Amino acid sequence: MRRYGLVVCFVLLCVVGLCAVPFLGCLDTSTPVDQSDDDVIDDDDNGDDDDGQMVWIAGKDWVGGRGVLLQREQDGWKRLDPLDPDGNWDLKQVAVGGANYAVAVGNLLSEYQGLIAYFNGEKWSSISPSSAPEKWSLNAVDIADDHVVAAGSDQENLASPVGLLLHYDGNSWHNRDLPQVGSEWELLDLDMLSNENGFAVGHSGRNGSRQGVILRWKDAEWIDYTLPDVSDDWELHAVSFAGTGAVWSVGVDNSGTVSRPVTLYKSEGPWQQVDVEDTRMELNGVNFISSSLGFICGESLGKGIVYRFNVGDWEKQDLPDVDGQWLLNDIAMVSQTEAYAVGKSVQDDQGIALYWNGAQWSQIDLPQISSNWEPLGIGVTH
């Protein structure tokens, strides 16, 4: 989820079907976990007061097979350990609807189960939507008003998974009917501007013949778009509103001998392909804070890369020197003059975080979680 007008704070995730864990450092460890209704979100205790800017990193410890959650504090980074479930699991994304309202998603990979957790400012509750398939996975989540939407894939047929959108409408969860995009497809990201307007993106087909997919939530149904003929093998990784009338989506074209960037833009007319730079590049993240200011990030020629959209033009950013090969997975804007990006050093198998102060990018030191770990997402609020 790359949100216009609402920046994201990463908070603690916990596991579906297992006990949720209180948020150490923010909650007393004696705070009970409410599991009285596994299918309902109660947001009556929501508040709107923030304690100041918060920055969270979610990711994966590839050595331990565990999710990673880091909180930035004044004196550095603090790791917060969610519940330790059996099996291999990860933390993918979290959406914040207010200071005391958060919904997070991930996957218990060893069980082919998506994970959903809800925080109401006092306690965590694990959520097991009765409408979810027996086997499923989640890649993204977003909040709009009192609605929650999670995107991923239905894996009942492991050989041919299909797109999945679970929607909490303020009362209950629904497995939304989706267009017949293809026999095999998946959704990787979404952005909800309101409970009546949102986009989800991903790909259809198998490796070597994938096609980008964009769905829109409008008039209480998900519809698919006719997209530009990019190539015989391309996909979309991220999407972001850029004002109420514009949307950007980014990904990669794998049809050639090297990866090429895909950048799509829509305003009032059809989707259009926009050339950022004709070079080897894969784009993984996009975030706009207004119609005239936003960032995209990814990897080019073995190095992390960031472009800034500034009043109609894409400008390549000067980034800090990082030894060896590295990449960026996600980017989030705090304001007109602040942004963060996260990724991984391929050479050292360590996480990387960058900070933009409105003028230049600098690298932020991260703790060594293990000999091989990777930030997958960055969330901020203030």
Image (tube, rainbow, N blue to C red):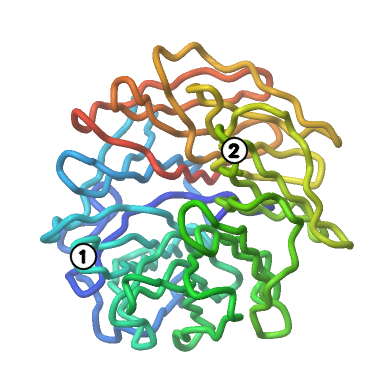
Residue depicted at 53% across the width and 51% down the height? 8
Q: Residue at x 79, y 58 (%)?
A: 271
Left or right, 381 with respect to 358, comes to: left
Q: Residue furthest left?
A: 86
Across and down, in percent, residue 67 comes to: 26, 49
The answer to whether 118 is drawn above or below residue 365 in the figure is below
Query: Circle 1 is placed at which residue position?
Result: 31
Which residue occupies the foreground of this view, 327 or 351? 327
Residue under label 2: 256
Callout 1 amino acid: Thr
Q: Please state, as top left, top right, bottom left or bottom right, where the C terminus lies in the image.
A: top right
x then y, percent, for residue 31: 21, 65
Q: What x and y, as percent, mark residue 47?
A: 50, 64
Q: Is residue 341 above or below residue 221?
A: above
Whichever of callouts 2 and 1 sits on the residue coming sooner in the sequence is 1
Q: Is residue 238 above or below residue 201?
A: above
